[in-house]
Image (cartoon, coloured by chain):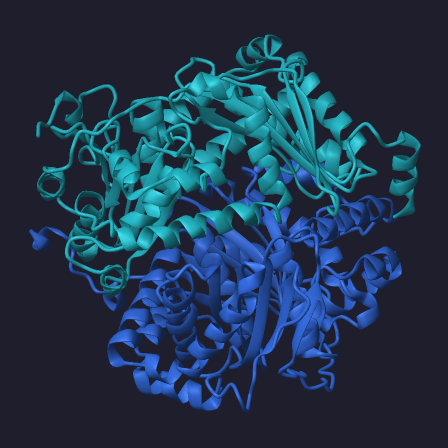
């Protein structure tokens, strides 16, 4: 029977090659043609995000992202929106701490329109009249998240953990900063942070790479340059190891979040750190069997978050108010026992799951686009799907033990996690 | 096990090829003796995705035992086929497969995806869960308590609470009897959870079987081998029960649920729509795309782009009890909510006047693209295969759907819209600190200018 089912292993799977081009303007072009694909996806990956903002201008990156959809000098907001919908309505954008990404996917016959429209979007007019209505939308977005306790508790945690470090700033900004951002401030942020050297255009799927390269050379050659972003002397993260309770008697349950030091994106053991987080806080991890399988909490996890120069292990749980202390103690006990979770079998199991997941995520151009663009922003060079899969397949138990030595998250007495709990409780130890 | 006429390429219900393989049919539909239908699409590539849809959901919970379907789905994974819960999860992980699925109002889905070579292993594990679950009594108390926690968690999530409230107001609970129907969330009710016992759940499990269930599979494997694998795997599965729960819509109602500390007022409008098997289904889909399909769509433009009233605004089709409904949502801070509601109603209210040529063309492009995108990923395609067979009673190929969309004219759609009035019959449910309508409109204007 089984010979009827292809025995191709994860590493043997054929994946498309990536082309890297540097345009004279300084803009980077990544092309990954796949003739077998049924669609084409394109995205502008801008190497800037919330961590590049001053505290007074918190939310500027995200505000700019919204304003990009309000039209260029050549197109009104309504015209741009119509053009985006004419592509099939698959355009969107997101802002994170380190990147701002504008992306769209379309049927292959729309490739020229896709590239042209996405490029119009990248040349915003930043009109004052559009700014005011969009400010209302963003304030509604802030209000929406303020109604979501799991989001609130993460914002509180990051403020404690990072202190004055810019990774502690909320991506959306606050009602105060968003209400105060002026057109001049937004235009200056845009001019300084959207220079050609900060921008990568990635195209994946069914398209002709020679035609797209020729188009890019003609259309993107004049992209304005900007001075390199200053690399400020950053305040060290505080990670004070404190336990803080945000008392909110209107809530029914307790949401708790905690954070510990991890590894940066560029670290060679980054995949091993992801495996360690999975052994502790993945779907089949120790937290699940200790806290969920026993019914103590109805959610508990731990993930490895990576930034360009620093990383964290961040996780948490939700539970009944009167169980919060028991669950937190259980969570700490799982962390303390992390060393025992690292066995050859467990590591092989987790790394295989990651490798297969990486491979299958790349099956559609839109899925592959994000990995390609974000990996390039992080490392300065593209990684093929085969590379990424291979990095997971090679993770050993020794690698994971080395992560635990570098990030002693099991040594909870000497390096306690920073904890914030939100809910109808007064105290927590 | 028989391979019926529908298993041949000539049958009208079955498409005869996708772009992957031009030499012959690439989709097969088989019906096993116990009624299980298997829709298989062969596609070159390293991976497979499988979606098994059983026609038992939270609406089928017996009255007084609300939460049965939700708790049972969790219980099934607490050990099966001689493996403990933990060994079972390890066995799935050893294959590197990803599990998905969950309990909806009308169906429970079990999804698995991974590499082609691991399909037989993954299917064997799934069959253990469905056909040979341990159902240990000792685990049930924990699962009932988790459902209780989930239920209490709803109180902290206004949009989810609104969705539950909207169904409970808009649908006549009594019409669903002897089933509990659509008024409660999948986690149940406190009373229902208190009544559930190991015996009641084991009895409930007998609903699950081949009858009405559909397994959608996309993989790269010989169809004869897939057919043999399915036959041997599910030979011993019972027939089960396949009941459609009646969804009787109650039009024109208005209800407000106070939520004192909320930052926003959440608005839900439920309206009648078009049934999946009705000839106007695609006309309706196209109209909804023009209403809410993209950033130039009517709702997005009028509520968000033009007035900045909300971040989140949308309208989407919902199928319940074999009928279609339109579900419209927006969230605004309390002072703006009355205007948001007015704009929503005005946009629904002008649908009968029809679409413009430009809106029609754009919506058609959007819908055509979404058909292709929906079939592109393995998991999405497996799910649409299953949904096609369960809801549309046939496999709709991408080419077929694109052809039908291409044939649709503006005149057709506008003729349909002339008789479609979702505003006139809408049932409105709001949730927030202030009842919508109780705010002085002058305050709303001040608030808008204030930002």
Residue drawn at the location 20% of the way across and 51% of the way down: B134
Q: Nearer the viewer, residue A108 or B147?
A: B147
Judged left or right of residue B291, residue A14 is left
On the image, the x and y values in percent for residue B205 come to: 26, 37
Residue drawn at the location 53% of the way across and 60% of the way down: A319
On the image, the x and y values in percent for residue A309 come to: 59, 81
Q: Is residue B407 visible?
A: no
Colour chain A is painted in: blue
Q: Nearer the viewer, residue A329 or A96?
A: A329
- From what the image shows, is residue A226 above or below residue A404? above
- From what the image shows, is residue A192 above or below residue B151? below
Q: Quadrant of residue A177?
A: bottom right
Q: Nearer the viewer, residue A48 or A181?
A: A181
On the image, the x and y values in percent for residue B96 come to: 28, 62
Q: Which chain is cyan?
A: B
Judged left or right of residue B184, residue A241 is right
Q: Quadrant of the C terminus of chain A?
A: bottom right
Residue drawn at the location 87% of the way across and 41% of the way down: B448
Q: Is residue B419 visible?
A: yes
- From what the image shows, is residue B335 above or below residue A98? above
Q: How many marks?
A: 0
On the image, the x and y values in percent for residue B270 come to: 60, 24
Residue drawn at the location 85% of the way across and 47% of the way down: A132
């Amino acid at each position: 029977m089984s010979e009827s089912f292809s025995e191709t292993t994860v590493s043997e799977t054929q994946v498309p090659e990536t082309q890297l081009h540097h345009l004279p303007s300084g803009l980077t072009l990544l092309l990954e043609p796949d003739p077998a694909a049924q669609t084409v996806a394109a995205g502008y990956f801008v190497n800037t995000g919330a961590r590049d903002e001053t505290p007074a201008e918190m939310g500027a990156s995200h505000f700019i992202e919204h304003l990009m959809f309000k039209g260029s000098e050549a197109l009104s907001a309504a015209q741009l929106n119509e053009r985006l919908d004419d592509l099939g309505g698959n355009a969107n954008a997101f802002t994170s701490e380190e990147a701002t990404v504008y992306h769209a996917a379309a049927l292959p016959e729309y490739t020229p329109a896709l590239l042209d429209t996405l490029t119009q979007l990248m040349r915003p007019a930043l009109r004052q009249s559009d700014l005011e209505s969009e400010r209302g939308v963003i304030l509604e977005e802030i209000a929406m998240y303020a109604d979501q306790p799991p989001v609130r508790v993460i914002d509180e945690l990051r403020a404690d953990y990072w202190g004055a470090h810019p990774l502690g700033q909320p991506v959306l900004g606050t009602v105060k900063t968003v209400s105060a951002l002026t057109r001049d401030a937004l235009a200056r942020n845009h001019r300084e942070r959207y220079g050609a050297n900060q921008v990568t255009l990635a195209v994946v799927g069914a398209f002709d790479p020679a035609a797209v390269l020729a188009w890019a050379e003609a259309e993107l050659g004049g992209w304005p340059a900007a001075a390199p972003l200053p690399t400020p002397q950053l305040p060290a993260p505080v990670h004070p190891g404190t336990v803080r309770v945000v008392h909110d008697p209107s809530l029914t349950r307790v949401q708790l979040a905690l954070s510990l030091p991890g590894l940066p994106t560029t670290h060679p053991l980054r995949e091993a750190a992801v495996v360690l987080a999975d052994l502790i806080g993945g779907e089949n991890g120790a937290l699940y069997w200790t806290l969920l399988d026993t019914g103590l909490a109805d959610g508990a996890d731990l993930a490895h978050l990576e930034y360009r120069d620093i990383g964290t292990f961040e996780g948490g749980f939700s539970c009944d108010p009167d169980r919060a202390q028991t669950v937190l103690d259980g969570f700490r006990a799982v962390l303390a026992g992390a060393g025992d979770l690292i066995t050859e079998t467990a590591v092989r199991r987790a790394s295989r799951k990651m490798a297969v997941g990486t491979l299958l995520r790349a099956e559609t151009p839109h899925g592959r686009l994000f990995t390609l663009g974000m990996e390039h922003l992080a490392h300065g060079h593209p990684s093929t799907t085969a590379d990424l899969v291979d990095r997971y397949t090679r993770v050993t138990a020794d690698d994971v033990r080395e992560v635990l030595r570098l990030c002693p998250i099991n040594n909870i007495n000497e390096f306690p996690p920073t904890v914030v709990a939100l809910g109808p409780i007064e105290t927590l130890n | 096990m028989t391979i019926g006429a529908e298993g041949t390429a000539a049958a009208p219900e079955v498409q005869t090829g996708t772009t992957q393989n031009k030499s012959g049919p690439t989709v097969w539909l088989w019906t096993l003796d116990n009624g299980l239908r298997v829709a298989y699409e062969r596609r070159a590539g390293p991976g497979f995705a499988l979606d098994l849809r059983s026609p038992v959901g939270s609406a089928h919970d017996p009255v007084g035992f609300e939460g049965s379907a939700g708790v049972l789905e969790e219980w099934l994974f607490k050990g099966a086929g001689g493996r403990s819960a933990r060994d079972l999860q390890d066995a799935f992980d050893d294959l590197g497969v990803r599990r998905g699925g969950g309990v909806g109002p009308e169906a429970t889905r079990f999804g698995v995806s991974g590499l082609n070579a691991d399909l037989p292993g993954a299917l064997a594990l799934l069959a253990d869960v469905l056909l040979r679950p341990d159902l240990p009594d000792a685990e049930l108390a924990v699962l009932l308590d988790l459902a209780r926690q989930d239920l209490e968690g709803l109180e902290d999530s206004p949009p989810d609470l609104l969705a539950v409230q909207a169904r409970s107001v808009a649908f006549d609970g009594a019409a669903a009897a002897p089933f509990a129907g659509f008024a409660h969330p999948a986690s149940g009710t406190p009373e229902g959870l208190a009544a559930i016992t190991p015996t009641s759940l084991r009895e409930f499990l007998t609903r699950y079987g081949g009858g009405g269930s559909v397994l959608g599979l996309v993989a790269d494997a010989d169809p004869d081998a897939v057919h043999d694998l399915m036959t041997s795997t599910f030979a011993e599965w019972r027939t089960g029960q396949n009941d459609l729960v009646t969804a009787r819509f109650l039009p024109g109602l208005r209800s407000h649920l106070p939520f004192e500390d909320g930052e926003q007022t959440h608005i839900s409008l439920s309206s009648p729509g078009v049934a999946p098997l009705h000839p106007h289904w695609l006309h309706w889909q196209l109209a909804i795309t023009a209403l809410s399909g993209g950033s130039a769509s009517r709702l997005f433009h009028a509520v968000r782009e033009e007035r900045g009233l909300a971040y989140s605004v949308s309208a989407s089709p919902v199928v319940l009890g074999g009928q279609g409904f339109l579900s419209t949502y927006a969230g605004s801070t309390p002072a703006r909510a009355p205007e948001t509601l007015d704009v929503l109603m005005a946009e629904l209210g002008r649908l009968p006047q029809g679409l413009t040529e430009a809106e029609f063309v754009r919506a058609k492009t959007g819908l055509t693209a979404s058909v292709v995108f929906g079939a592109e990923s393995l998991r999405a395609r497996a799910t649409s295969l299953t949904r096609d067979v369960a809801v549309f009673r046939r496999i709709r190929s991408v080419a077929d759907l694109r052809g039908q969309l291409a044939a649709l004219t503006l005149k057709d759609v506008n003729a349909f819209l002339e008789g479609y009035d979702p505003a006139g019959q809408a049932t409105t449910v709001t949730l927030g600190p202030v009842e919508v309508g109780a705010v002085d409109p002058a305050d709303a204007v001040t608030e808008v200018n204030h930002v």
